[in-house]
Image: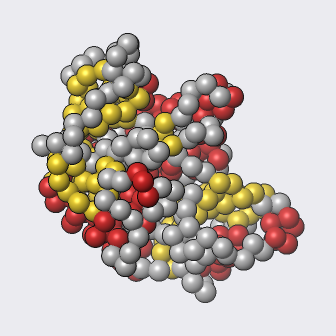
Amino acid sequence: MLAAYATGTGGDDLLANLEVGEREIPAPPRGFVRLAVLAATLNHHDLWTLQGVGVPPSSFPRTLGCDVAGRVESYGPDTPPSLPVGSEVVAHAVVTCGVCDACLGPDETLCRRFALLTEGPYEGTLAEYCVVPAQNLFPIPAGLSPEQAACLPTAYLTAYRMLFNKGGLRPGGTVLIQGAGGGLSTAAEILALAAGLRVIVASRSRSKREAALGRGVHHAVATGSEEVSEVLALTAGEGVDVVLESVGEATWAASLRVLRRGGAVVVAGATSGADPPSDLRRVFWRQLRVLGSMMGTRAEFRSLLQMVEATRVHPLIDSVFPLSDAGAAFSRLEAGELAGKLVVKVS
């Protein structure tokens, strides 16, 4: 089968570690199902794999990709079908042990053996075929194409959990999204607007701010020296309820300063650096909450799919590439000038 896979890690040119070529068609083990892939999407996690983050050198070659929409082809031995063969599905990208206290409780993402597809013993989804846990299958929401459905498992689930579980936002609340334009930030915009939130985005790029306003966000401000004063002016000096933070060092100080008393900054990334000044006096004096967030549970993924179907929102796609041209998709991801998700379509 054709696949986009990493042959190694590191070096000055990360994409030199990427190849698109033939790999063996995977056989589903017990508890898993093989999908004929219809579409997959790229995430920064794929670049981290090429960097060698969390991946032992002995684990290459390794097919990349966390997200997939596909057609059910076959189940592993002694695996009860969760959906009929031939069903078009989207797969939850989180794999856990299923037996620990976390897995048996309300949040399996706290499992000590937590992994995403393409981590640990699991191969990824950027291929003509992939295997995923059978319990992770869900029907594609009505009205979505496979390309749109493939956007949901990582970026949209992460945004959903940040907004509504960790952030606890409800209709009428105000959220600031740091770093407009990428897959996670546009997912957060779309879901927040659909939920009746007041949405402010911040970006250093004028074109990205204008594009966000065109998508319906209420306000777009420039990151930098005036960001705090602009956001406070937009909120009558009170500050926002929640900040979604995935930029890190470049925006952290502003994220803390624009929060109302008792507000929360929800962190799911640090693309500009992971060690900003902590400003602990502001944290305790204003009783701020700093919350980490990672992906989401199967229950949250089910709720996300129900929300998408009920509100008829459509994930924003930047561009679609054939699997044979996955290298070009990775080049665009690495460049960072995106408006939505990068999709790889499989014939």
Pick the front one: 87 or 188: 87
Q: Is residue 125 above or below residue 85?
A: below
Coordinates of residue 60 in the picture (x, y in percent): 36, 54
Rendered image quadrant of residue 72: top left
Query: Quick one: quadrant of the C terminus?
Result: top left
Q: Is residue 291 left or right of residue 139?
A: right
**Whether residue 343 can be seen here:** no
Coordinates of residue 221 in the picture (x, y in percent): 52, 75
Rendered image quadrant of residue 342: bottom left
Q: Is residue 140 left or right of residue 24?
A: right
Q: Is residue 230 above or below residue 59?
A: below
Which residue occupies 65% across, 28% down? Answer: 100
Q: Is residue 166 above or below residue 104?
A: below
Q: Is residue 153 left or right of residue 244?
A: left
Pick the front one: 343 or 119: 119
Coordinates of residue 45 in the picture (x, y in percent): 43, 57
Coordinates of residue 283 in the picture (x, y in percent): 80, 66
Query: Quick one: quadrant of the N terminus?
Result: top left
Q: Is residue 274 above or below residue 301?
A: below
